[in-house]
Amino acid sequence: MTSPHCPPAAEPIPDFFWDDLLAYIEERRVIPILGPELFTVPDGGGGEVPLPHLLALRLAERLRVPLDPASAGDHPLNDVVSRYLQGGGRREDIYPRVRNLLKELAPPVPPALRALARIRHFNVFVTTTFDGLLAQALDEERFGGAPTTQSLAFAPNRTQDLAPGAANAAAPTVFHLFGRVSASPDYVVTEEDTLEFFTALQSETRRPQLLFDELKTHHLLLLGGTLPDWLSRFFLRTAKSHRLSLQREESEIVAGHRARHDSAFGGFLRTFSYRTQIFQQGNAAEFVTELAARYAARHPASVAPHTPAPASPAASPATGETMRAGSVFISYASQDLPAVQKLRDALDDAGIEVWFDKRRLESGDDFDQQIRRNIRGCSFFLPVISASTQARHEGYFRLEWSLAAERSQLIADSIPFILPVLIDPIPEAEALVPERFLKFQWSRLPGGQPTPEFVERLVRLIRDYRKREKGLL
């Protein structure tokens, strides 16, 4: 952000700070990154505590390990697990028990999350918590409770990433940077887990590249984080991908107890990251309350819960109807549907939006126009070459291939567009494909089973595509 600077705590925040922030939000140039302080739940005694604290108390009871709530600090679950392991317990026991506890507690959605969900110009959220409360808040506030929000999760052994165009998609996205609760150890409970996740996030092949591209080029709201000082610095540096002291347009606002009271962290930001401002006038929930109230005053009609018309199954990009720009178009013979579904599922898991028609409709004016629009709008075209396509000298896929080859002539040779996929042992020179297909790099995926290298390559290509769209390449 070019202007809002949080003044000293003794001074009220001027209106221009909020006006500038709301202007960036309305331009969809701001991504909120949420921490545990905003995920408060009733403690059973008339007060509220962060959800991890309540989970730690219940887990300590179940594991029969001592826990002093007053000395638990910001990472009570780590304290409980450490005591359990020191007593001879197994690490693998922890994750299903935390999952079961969370299901039993069924905590209500915190007011701060509801307030954020009503800011409809927020469409991409990042959370460092493993629960599903943020997605629940979005579904209830925007869609009348219908499960519409896309929920993605990073784990060191499984990379999911944002879909192209997520910031402007019809449904919001919640990205769990430290994993999402499950029976497996694929989410952060302990400090060791945090270390493993941060290590994986430094890997070019495992990190969610599209997400980090967005973090780099957007203003960030870091709300209610509880990471230690050094990890907070490290995360901010990773998100911005270059030295924090270098001149840059995008800035960050940090709100929360740790940011206000950790003098070392605040001193570091003031000295080396002049584009980062610390909200000194209250905690993260108070910041959200003020922001949501000012947003509602500017957009009174948009903050009421909304129930959309039920989506037609054909409206999904995977089912063969309207697709959004930036999707990957898969073209294939109908006999190869089982293999193509393997390919589609792997790309879906990587956060890549895929379009393919699994009905193989008969040709007609409406369908022809739809195919032509989608081939013009996709970012990549994946023709699936097989024994079935070799055996069929006629087929609708051949029209799709011709249209893609025609479009590729308008694209610079250095820009990838057609990515042929060979699922049967056929020599490329003998493949019955448009001659232009032979100019491109082919991928051999026997039976349609994608390799990690293939998925990683496509993720990188989509990342470069998005950079070109933004003029960064």
Image (cartoon, grey):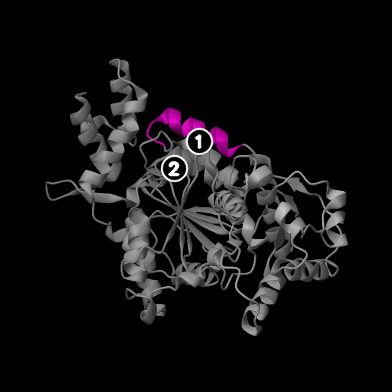
Residue 115 visible in this rendered orientation of the protein: no
Q: Position of residue 470 (x, y in %)?
A: 70, 64
Residue under the image location 50 percent in, 71 percent down: 314
Residue at 76% across, 54% down? 420
What span is colored magenta in the figure? 188-202
Quote the CA–CA distance across marks 1 and 2: 9 Å
Residue 339 appears in view: yes
Q: Quadrant of residue 356?
A: bottom right
Quarter where residue 204 is shown? top right
Q: Residue at x 70, y 76 (%)?
A: 372
Say what amino acid the circle numbered 2 marks: Gly
Query: Which residue carries the number 2 mark?
Result: 179
Between discs 1 and 2, the one toward the N terminus = 2
Residue 201, percent across and down?
57, 39
Place of residue 243 in the rendered image (x, y in percent of width and height, measured from the top left)? 65, 44
Q: Secondary structure at mark 1?
A: helix
Vertical relation: 191 (above or below) 378: above
In the image, taking residue 72 as reference, residue 434 lies left or right, namely right
Q: Is 241 situated left or right of 85 in this image?
A: right
- Label 1 Cα neighbours within 10 Å, binned few <14 / some 14-19 / many ≥20: many
Residue 194 included in the magenta stretch of the image: yes
Identify the main secondary structure in magenta: helix
Q: Which residue is mark 1?
A: 197
Three-letter code, disc 1: Phe
Q: Secondary structure at mark 2?
A: loop
* Frontmost residue, 16 versus 123: 123
Question: Which residue is drawn at the image coordinates 41% and 36% (left, top)?
Answer: 188
Nearer to the camera, 296 or 333: 333
